[in-house]
Amino acid sequence: VSALAALYRAEHGRVLAALLARVRDFPAAEEAVHDAFVAAAEQWRDRSIPPNPRAWLVRVATNKLIDRQRRRAKFPEVEMDETVPAPEDDRDVGDDRLRLIFTCCHPALAPEAQVALTLRTVAGLTTDEIAALFLAEPAAMAQRLVRTQKKIRDARIPYSVPAPDKLAERLTAVLAVVYLVFTEGYANLRDELCDEAIRLGRLVCELLPVEPEARALLALIQLQHARRAARVVDGELVLLADQDRTRWDASHLADGLAALDAALAAGAHGPYALQAAIAGLHAQPPPTDWSQIVELYDLLLAAQPSPLVELNRAIALALARGPELGLAALDRLRFALPEDHLYHAARADLLARLGRRDAAARAYRAALARATQPAERRFLERRLAALD
Amino acid sequence: MQYMLLIYLDEQVAAARSPSEVAAAVALHDPYIARLRANRRYAGSGVLRPTAHARTLRGGDGEPVATQGPFAESREQLGGFYVIEADDLDVAIEVAAECPALQTVAIAIEIRPVAHGALGDGGELVLARGTVPDAPGWLVLAEPGSATTLRLRDGKVELADGPFRDEPEPIAAARVVERWHGDATTTLEIRPLR
């Protein structure tokens, strides 16, 4: 890919954020930034990229915006704030980018709209790239983005960092977007989505260095992502206990553990911190401290009750105190997760450990009837075959 | 900037209330309106009579056709409205979240940004559906895609992106008149006020 594409990726969000600091019209700003990059592609084709491309892009985009407004002088809908200076360094733009993140993750926007717009404007992905990430039609994704930007303008969603009394609640929405991008990638074994989530998580931590929950989320996704190469081998899912630890990504693991320590030291105790602490325990050399993992799941259940958390707790309980107790805990979920393949797979595993082969086989078949991910299906098929 | 708060309720539930319950619920709005006025946020409000008193004019190429009853047959109907002044959507959400209707009879409050215009004064609310009438005197709303809908769930305000419901002919503009005598170039739903 060309230097310009890399520059687009790195600078699009920053330039847009700088422009939005002066104009409250999201679609118009986006259009002007697009024009500026088109101009850059033409001007820089024969010559080298200027020493401060960001300043160049902001200047050109601002001029494009003013030009368009002059041509549409009959509709003076855009008010320029000429008093805002052009950004010169990262520190200036940092505040703009933070405002941009909070605008994109505003609770009056649908979660999928928040995710798409954040990837488009903050992470600098093109519409086609986002459509590909979410296996959506590019035209439909473009429409969603346009609609979202129009809503921001027409409903006047503020372009600002929330007041301190609202910050925690609004940060939750931002972190949810980051985690949604990650889990979408994690569940579907799509590394590129996980990488984007980590990039976004790093950015949020960089812009809000004092927020322990943001740091905890970054720790969580880095620790989970560190295991990606060991998690699927030859197209088949490998359980954590059976993973080849030498295939874990040492740098993500180290980063994740460091972020976890920092988050816990700063007082993080929310759901991301608890999950990251569990992932941190899994990252320790064996034997795994399953009792402590069960305790952490208990805290997580108290903070965020969910059948999937209960499922994970039941699995940990089985490893800490035996399969009978785990199975009893799982049975309490039979009405909550009857269609979830993970529930049936976990039951099958515990039944097999108890030597109840027929029941285990039935449970594996129930899981196979519901699992769609090929790597998971191959894992379940092999487990089922191993019963005989 | 102005926002219109469209208060939706279940007409059967609302009709089942005793007169004293209704009076108590309506009385809650007086201090709310007083507070809005004191903060310079108030730009109008109204309580609608039930849709049994509504009439609908369907405009088009030929003569407009008038029918008794509301635009859409549904238990969930517009029951009242506010027009408020707010700097941005966050302020509008705060104002809407404090609306007493949310604690009493409302199913949801839809926040629609106002594009331009003013509502007027009188005894009937006229809702232009589908398209904005090509005439002055209307409070024109931004398109439904810019709406945000508030609901109360387990005592907590929840936000949803978009209008209260998707309709083929959503409310595009509104005005209050003494009594509507004009024709209909677009579909009009006329709702008497209390």
Image (tube, coloured by chain):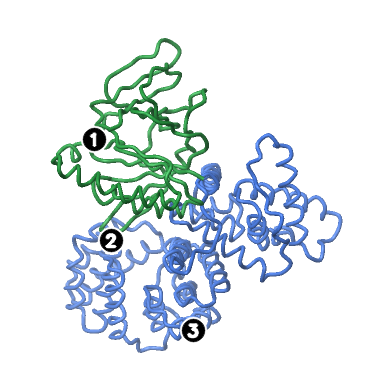
Label 2: how many Cα within 10 Å (few below 14, some 14–19, many 20+): many
Badge 1: chain ID:
B
Residue picked out by circle 2: A367
Q: Colour of chain A?
A: blue
Task: Say which of marks 3 and 2 sits in front.
Answer: 3
> Which is nearer the N-term, disc 3 or disc 2?
3
Residue A200 x %, y %: 54, 66
Q: Amino acid at mark 1?
A: Arg
Of all residues, the one furthest to the top in this rendering is B62
| A95 relative to B105, above or below | below
Label 1: how many Cα within 10 Å (few below 14, some 14–19, many 20+): few
User: Quick check: do tags 2 and 1 share a chain?
Assistant: no
Answer whether labels 2 and 1 touch (C-beta < 8 Å): no
SS at circle 2? helix
Q: Amino acid at mark 2?
A: Ala
Badge 3: chain ID:
A
Q: Is residue A259 left or right of residue A27?
A: left
Residue B6 x %, y %: 36, 40
Q: CA distance from mark 2 to mark 1?
A: 42 Å
Residue picked out by circle 1: B75
Q: Is residue B176 left or right of residue B77?
A: right
SS at circle 1? loop
Q: Is residue A242 left or right of residue A155?
A: left
Closer to the camera in the image, A377 or B105: B105
Label 3: how many Cα within 10 Å (few below 14, some 14–19, many 20+): some
Q: Colour of chain B?
A: green
